[in-house]
Each structure stands twice: as C-alpha cells, then as structure tokens.
Amino acid sequence: MTRWFEDIVIDEPHDLGTHTFTEAEILAFAKAYDPQYLHADPELARHGPFGGLVASGWHTVSIGHRKMVDALFAEEERLRAEGLEPGVSGPSPGVNRMDFTAPVRPGDTVRYTLTVTDKRPSNSIPGWGLLFNRLDAVNQDGLQVYHAELVGFSKLRDYRPGLGERAYLALTRLPFVGKLLRR
C-alpha cells in the first residue's frame, strides 16, 4: 500500500474491487497474449477440459495487478486529501507463489483482495522494508479463482543512515573512489 512501512497493518484486507470478464474481452486478451484454444476459440474450447471458453490465467493476473496499482494511487490521493504525506512503494523482488485455482468464465465477476501478511526491514537495501502480500480473487459464487503470494518494497519513514553508511554513500559519489568501491 502507499503507506510508510511503519504504518502498514498486518492482516488488514484491502478490497481492490471487482471486474466482470466478458467473452469479447477474454478473446481479445487471448488473441494478443495467450492464444491457446481454451482462451481464443469458443468452439474448440467446448471440447476442452473446462467445457467452454475460459480466461487466461495471465488475464486474471493482469486485471488483479491493475486493481492493485489503482488502489495504490487512490490511497495516495486519499492521504494527500487528509493533509498527510503518503509513503513510497517500491518495486517487487518477486512472486513466491501463484495458483490458478478455478477457471474464470465469460460473465464471471471476480473480487480481488490484497492483504499484507508480514513485513520486515530489508537486509540488503537500507531504508526500505519488505512486505509479504497475499492477493486473492474470488468469483461471484465465492469460489477462489486465483491466489498469489507477492513481495514488495516499502520505504521506511523514520530511517536515518548511520555514520558508516553516510560515509560510504558520500565516497561512492566521488568518480574514482566510487568506481573502486562498486567493484
């Protein structure tokens, strides 16, 4: 979330909203990114393992990721409207787990939820913390269709580098010394 590391609450679910998958959208995504018959050909998909057209798992992931990024921007706007300075979100060092637990079919409405399950200061990047997140997606029947365990960085608000770190950073800015230190 676009909060400072110190302000992030563990196990607080964040509703990211819903998305209804249409046949036209499933076909368009499949044509552009995942043209397997299960996603791209309604006639052939009828004879496939799911008995009909289903959305690509990557389509489900992409929608969830967009919902997550939109929520980050909305949280930033909300905090600024309250006169608060939003935190700084960083990149993701990776995905620890990703499960496509049920097919998403045309007409399904999927709700996405993000929950930070744990956090700790980074061991390798001073001033940043790691967030361990769970992203869940369930359809209109309450059936989970997607689950992921993601890691992301969040900046520490109150971080102050120690003297040794400040000296090292200053030295790396000197052209010759910096080149030697970065080796």
Image: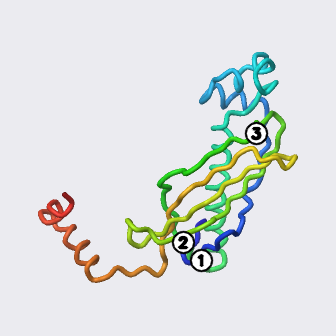
Task: Indicate the secondary structure of the residue bearing disc 3.
Answer: loop
Q: Which image quadrant: the C terminus?
A: bottom left
Cα distance in 3D space between marks 1 and 2: 9 Å
- Residue 182 located left or right of residue 18: left
Q: Which residue position holds label 1?
A: 7
Q: Residues within 10 Å of mark 3 (few under 14, many from 20)?
A: some
Q: Where residue 160 sits in the image (x, y, percent)?
A: 38, 81
| Amino acid at the residue labelled 1 | Asp
- The label nearer to you, 1 versus 2, is 1
Q: Residue at x 69, y 20 (%)?
A: 37
Is residue 134 shown above or below 39? below
| Amino acid at the residue labelled 2 | Gly
Tag 1–tag 2 contact (CB < 8 Å):
yes
Q: Where residue 81 sits in the image (x, y, percent)?
A: 66, 74
Q: Which residue position holds label 2?
A: 87
Residue found at the far left of this picture: 176
Task: Indicate the secondary structure of the residue bearing disc 2.
Answer: loop
- Residue 37 located left or right of residue 90: right
Task: Indicate the secondary structure of the residue bearing disc 1.
Answer: helix
